[in-house]
Image (cartoon, helix red, strand yellow):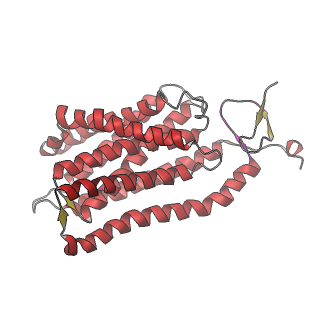
Amino acid sequence: MVRETCGRCGRDLGDAREGTYYCENCYKLLSRTGSGGLWAATLAVLSVLFLGGAGLALLAPTFGSEISGGWRLLLGLVLTLIPALLWLFFFYSQDQLEPEPHSYVVSIFVLGLLLGGAVEQPLLREVFEVQRWVQVGSMTHLLSSTFLSGILTAALTYLAVRFTVMPTSEFDERVDGIIYGTAAALGLGVAANLTYLMEVGTISLGVGTLHIVVTSLAYATFGGVVGYFLGLIKPGGGPDWLAPLGVLVAGMLHGLYEWMDAQLGTGGLGYNPWPSLIATTVFAGLIFGLIFYLLRRAYQEMLLRVPPERTGA
């Protein structure tokens, strides 16, 4: 009879089942070594990104509050890649029991970037012309952001994972879905940020930088939602209808995020970026916390508590 063994130490865990599981000792080791590293990684990423944006705001009077021309292109590329890579490293560092191959994660990130530049942004900007939606009614804008922009982004995240790494043997943990979904969405986020910089024509130091950081975080978390549902299908053994449900949930969250970003920046006194920036930061932070919860829950579901006679206790 085929037996289940711990994915880390090889201990016998009983009858085999779909997916990878871990014994209680290895899970406790993860909890002891991972908790401190988790908070350290969180604080490090948040400090570098948000304090970096604040630092640029303080330096704005020295170098000018806005940058355009050739420097805009160079600085824009740096500012879009650094947050995405830091968030990618952060989420990847959470997969501590059986880390995914670096090449797989980076490849999914690059695939997301290519899909964003070649498919998502041309469709949204040139076909659907989403930049005009803010001028329509509030509810119409919300629905448009959800069922066009949000669903398209979530669907591309799903496709990037579903038909590449998901059929492979490397996709054997529920956590893997979150990792790969985040990587794909971060690539889409880089394309979105670059398009944003090309449209505004300048980089506003401070506010513009923080907008890029928050957008990267938002894309990462929404991609994590799609990935979580994929993890419920394989290796979770859930029904296939969970995939479109995950796309719908992530699309709705993304649509609400874009609606807040556009609507809260306008008002009777003219454009003010801070209300939308603060609101979207809080919103993205809440979804970020949800992804954290789903990560820990996914690890807990891979724990198999072995009776004492099997552990030798």
> In this orientation, does residue 31 appear?
yes
- Residue 77 to residue 66: above or below: above
- Residue 297 to residue 172: above or below: below
| Identity of the residue drawn at 47% across and 29% down | 162
Assign the N terminus to one quadrant of the image: top right
| Identity of the residue drawn at 41% across and 47% down | 220
**Badge count:** 0
Rendering coords of residue 67 (x, y %) = 19, 62
Does residue 181 appear left or right of residue 27 in this picture?
Answer: left
Does residue 51 appear left or right of residue 21 in this picture?
Answer: left
Boundaries of the magenta span: 15-23
Q: Main secondary structure of the magenta part?
A: loop
Does residue 285 appear left or right of residue 24 in this picture?
Answer: left
Magenta span includes 134: no
| Identity of the residue drawn at 34% across and 40% down | 252
As drawn, the residue found furthest toward the front would be: 70
Rendering coords of residue 123 (x, y %) = 23, 32
Q: Nearer the viewer, residue 60 or 253?
A: 60
- Residue 22 to residue 272: above or below: above
| Identity of the residue drawn at 62% across and 46% down | 299
